Image (tube, helix red, strand yellow):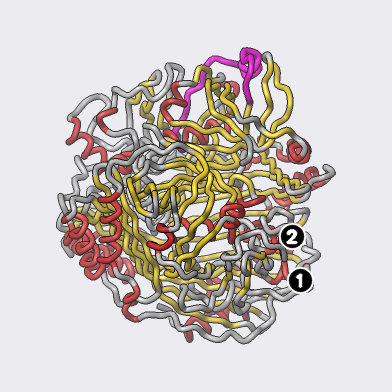
Amino acid sequence: MDELIARALNAAQLRGATYADVRVVETTRQSLLVRNGTVQGIAQTEDVGFGVRVVVDGAWGFASSHRMELAEAERVAEQAVRIARASALAKREDVDLGPPVVQRGSYRTPVEIDPFTVPLETKLDLLLRADAEMRRIRGVTTTEAEMVFLRQRKTFASTEGSYVTQEIIESGCGIEATAVRAGEVQRRSYPNSVGRHQQTRGWEFILEQDLVANAPRIAEEAVALLRADPCPDTVTTVILGGAQVALQIHESCGHAIELDRVFGTEAAYAGTSFLTPDKLGRFRYGSEVVNIVADATVPGGLGTFGWDDEGVPAQRVDIVREGLFVGYLTDRETARRLWRLLGSSPDVPGESNGAARAMSWNRIPLVRMTNINLLPGDWRLEDLIADTDEGILMDTNRSWSIDDRRLNFQFGCEIAWEIKRGRRTRLLRNPIYTGITPEFWRSCDAVCNADHWVLWGTPNCGKGEPGQIAHTGHGAAPARFRNVRVFGRR
Amino acid sequence: MLGRRKVEVLLQEALMRSGADETEIVLLAAEEALTRFANNTIHQNVAETNGEVAVRVVVGKRLGSAITNRLDPEAIAQAIAWAEAAARLAPEVPDFPGLAEPLPVDPVMAFDDAVAALGPEDRAREVREALRIAESSGAIAAGALSARVEEVAVVNSKGVFCYHAGTRVRFSTVAHREDGSGYAERAAWRWDALDIPSLARSAVERAVRAQNPRAVAPGVYPVVLDPYAVRDVVSWLGHAGAGALAVQEGRSWMNGRIGTRVLSEHVTLWDDGRDTAGIPLPFDFEGVPRQRVGIVERGVPQGPVYDTVTAAREGKRSTGHALPRAWPEAASLGPLPAHLFLAPGEATLEQLLRALDRGLYITRFWYTRLVHPRDCVVTGMTRDGVFWVEGGEITYPVRDLRFTQGYVQALAAVRQVGRETWLLSDGRFGSDRVPALFLEAFTFTGTTES
């Protein structure tokens, strides 16, 4: 592999690249799916290849291939250079990466039990038992239980002298029960919806989720929801469960602070952002209880690593400090551009904070979320409910949508309960809430404490053309929001 | 490109290495390049060479799968061995009907040498022209031009061998001015079917027209939807309920409605993977020839599309709509339509607008998600051009709106259909060809106030 990397870097430089980097990525993904009592899929996917990124004539080029051969390394490097020269035909200014980044070392996800050493029989047995527990509940029509394990070995090398290797391991799992009756369809999921909960941890993460013990409850709730009252159409206090808070952070903060979007490079696809540079350090994003950090160093997050895909070390940076917007997610190019625009300050260091991430060898790094975490507050959930005279507690996402500047959002949840005089009362189905990002976060008056804080995994974040799916993390605890518009199915 | 002969030799040799009762191998290989622009400059410019084989083996009624993107015989043999080992551990799938039997697949010509020959300089020149058009009108353009050469093959131990090589190109652009934006997009398998300057001009003209938008209160309005928005409606109907698994599990908008007129009589929707007016793929990922399937006929749902598993449950034959079954996710999705066509009508866009006394002209929907499967209730935002129409004339631009709307009810309210259809595609496979629509009622639930 080292020879392939050297050959590619050398070929790029010989053909005129002023900067080049090579990423070799080898991914093994194992997935198991049990559906309605039968094993629908046991699959292992192996994916390997390399990508060469170059700057030539002040413009970017990138080419990639799955053929791990020396001659192919030269061909791909040549192709990247040719592409960069073509990019320069429609160039406005030269690429500015700022000071060189020179990093050397290796990183491996700390795991207690490597999930790839656990026998398939053990994994299947756990899934089949969880599935059987759901199917025991009368009225359930469809059940699913799944696990996913990922091992990604990455090597990054650049003409600036960086050479880093990483091995990232992820484990994920989830169960889901669906009940159907007379035109109503209700689904409950655990630990999270839309597939699963996932972390950069080992088999121990799967065992901690205790899928089997939670299966009957999930199935019972799906059936109970068929006959539940619809969520009322009103403006009220809302308490969101931690998994839903995580998605709220992802959509309304995480994407909004991606500096490439702010600068317009996602304008045609993923959209831009309302958090324009003039707001940095001045804009009240949320209430004083809202503290958000981007933290690629926290153990277990799907956005946790040693170095990003430009070789920049993992970091923790403030994003929202006591409600004030103070930081962006950056890569080398956008960090430099912000610095040129605003000048140097503690919040504008002019160097990347390590958020350049690529889906794999065949994609270029984009500014992507690491772990965007809402720091815990002081409340116990029981006390928060008791402190709420009237409201609705919603949990587990069912649908999500937000406008292209990340302002107007609407989220549906799987389940809700009415809160009356400090007590959780009747079940409500098809709950939806909607709002405008800064108004919503300014209405947050309570965040639960560290006992309720979970580092949720979001393994399905889409961005970029050609499309890239990123794995991001979001530490969150249940939180309370005032004067929120809610309604049921329309 | 690997070419048909090389693919056949590779896959047949791999098949012979399998010790399973039945074996299926799907090959997907592509050369793809994409030139992306924003702020009136090319900022990303990429190319990829990749290919993978997806192996599915059957031992008795036990199944295992493996996928690799290393296309040498040893790597494929390792994948087969892993799949066999996994299959032997799995409990039986009692209703598994076996792999597909061989059926004749007539080839479809959808390969354009001009697309295959496109180089980065060609793409850059096209993009530069689009940027020149934007700049000359004071607009800032963003978008992408992509070109793809793909090969798909399916082989199985029962004698199936299908191979298809095709091309596709796609251009999309958003033109921004101070206070509004315009969008244009088109896909094709032929290079000469893509008129990039015309699309760039269309986006810019809309951006010019979208300046100084006014707020309109949420509510129920009659609307004219551009094909970009119509494509969203059609696509959700396809994915959230026109596959047999969703119907069999009772979670489709079709349940209880097949054979009953629930949509407007102006709505006729079908799937046809062989039609060269789309971006064809003449067989599915089980190697079954794709059939033309009528999904809605003059407002009456006709039924879903099938793969071998869902068809066997009803004693039917697959319609050729299987996803790659080695993908674990495919088991949850079931068969899906991938080449939808919404029948055109008689009206020009101007005639559709003239029929609108007071209502909205919507260019595009954005970030749409299924809120509830029954009725295919979807929420999303408008984007890149919304206009108020009064007395049949566009009078002023409107700020973006959020909608939450049952797409079944929306299509029940179709009063007129446009005569021009546009070919649109954003996925790896498939495409949709759709016209503009005039709907009598569409529900908007919110606005964005920044």
**According to the image, label 1 marks what residue?**
B312
- Say yes or no: labels 1 and 2 on the same chain: yes
Which amino acid, mark 2?
A: Gln
Residues at marks 1 and 2, CA–CA distance in whole angstroms: 12 Å
User: Is residue A248 found left or right of A384 in the rendered image?
Assistant: left
Q: Which residue is drawn at 18% across and 64% down?
A: A15
In the rendered image, which quarter is residue B77 located in? Answer: bottom right
Across and down, in percent, residue B372 comes to 63, 46
Which amino acid, mark 1?
A: Ala
**Mark 1 vs mark 2: in front:** 2
Cβ atoms at labels 1 and 2 below 8 Å apart:
no
Q: What element carries label 2?
A: helix
Across and down, in percent, residue A358 comes to 39, 50
Look at the image and give the residue range highlighted in magenta: A372-392
Q: Residue at x 53, y 22 (%)?
A: A483
Q: Is mark 1 on a helix, strand or loop?
A: helix
Viewer-proximal residue among A50 and A358: A358
Across and down, in percent, residue A239 comes to 59, 24
Q: Which mark is residue B248?
A: 2
Q: Residue at x 63, y 14 (%)?
A: A389
Letter of the chain that mark 2 sits on in the rendering = B
